[in-house]
Amino acid sequence: MSDQQQTSDKNNSDNNLPPQDKPQDNLKDNLKDNFTDINTRHIIFKLTPKISHKYILLMRLDRLIGVYLVLFPAIWGLLSGYYGTYTKTYDISHMKSSGYILLYGGLCVIGAIIARSAGCIINDLWDRNIDKQIERTKNRPLANGSIKPRSAIILLIILGIIGISLLYSLPFSAFKWGLYAIPLIILYPLAKRFFSIPQIMLGITFNWGVFIGIACFRSVGWHDVILYIASILWTIGYDTIYAHQDIKDDIKTGVKSSAIYFNKNTKTIVSWLYVFLLVLLALYGMLINIQSKNYYLGLMVAVVLLFIQVIFVTLEEPKSCLFAFKSNIVIGLIIALSFVFGMLAIL
């Protein structure tokens, strides 16, 4: 058989393969004419073998914004738990826990990466047929067939084992709160099929780390629900802006979102969400006896930046929505620093 015939037979063979078994095309070529948030220039692709790239995309490790948005509420809770314990003890022996906040903070970082990666896999398993119809998501590995569902499930199990092992390293109370989050992580991707504002379910899930962080140092009290609700309002706000990227495709496919539900009122409603965010965070500071003005000034700065974000975002332009969404890293950091500088008054 000639080389030409062999080449022709190979091409025909590839064309006859089911989608999940076809070799993955060049990623940059696939994305060249499509709007997507996939970052093909991320350094992680240069540091890892090509065979792992589709799994990196599946876990969104080239886009760490989601990790930060899961991490910051846990850090807020961790700082709140530490502060509350310190103010109640007034004992020099409590200073030994200063080292623990660094340890638990490090575990929260790793846990956020694991939880977010697992959540992305679960989301894509549920939504792989929908993602094929959405411009921004059609090149996700499960949607384009470059990864089989079975392989994704195996990776999910591995992440689950690692995640539970990390939780076991935390105090038992925090371990229990972590286990409570597992059903939420599994089920929240279904919310967009049944609820007009699925971002509420996203907020409930994404911000569960508030309770885990607090439980590392003390029992979770009723007042801690205020911090949790404030975090949920933040999530509904930034994810509504994010959802405007897909609003046309979501309407076409029947997917529900707050962007569709709020429609032309998005900026007004999101602005009010951020007002209540400020009020609840300020109230929470008073309840846990943060007396430093630094905390409240930090909150004011964060909310002003959120209002600037709402004013200048162009909801009809996906890139503008994505930029506004990513800027929430700064917001989460400022609120975390507000807790830190509020705590410095008693140290």
Image (tube, rainbow, N blue to C red):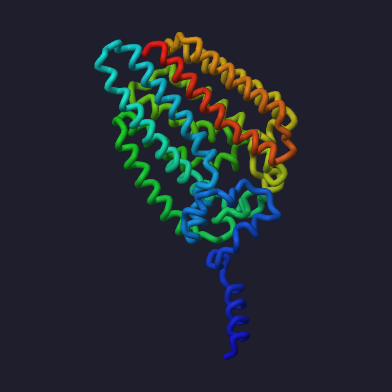
Give the residue drawn at x 59%, y 52%: 40
Q: Which residue lies furthest to the left in this view?
A: 93
Residue 226 vs residue 162, the one in the foreground: 162
Residue 24 vs residue 271, the one in the foreground: 24
Question: Where is residue 284 drawn, in percent x and y?
Answer: 48, 15
Residue 269 vs residue 101, the one in the foreground: 101
Question: Where is residue 4 drawn, in percent x and y?
Answer: 62, 85
Question: Where is residue 215 drawn, in percent x and y?
Answer: 35, 26
Give the residue drawn at x 34%, y 41%: 164
Q: Quadrant of the N terminus?
A: bottom right
Residue 29 found in image quarter: bottom right
Q: Quadrant of the C terminus?
A: top left
Asked if residue 233 lies left or right of residue 168, the reply is right
Give the residue drawn at x 57%, y 26%: 233
Give the residue drawn at x 41%, y 22%: 79
Question: Where is residue 25 drawn, in percent x and y?
Answer: 60, 63
Q: Which residue lies furthest to the bottom in this view?
A: 1
Residue 198 vs residue 87, the one in the foreground: 87
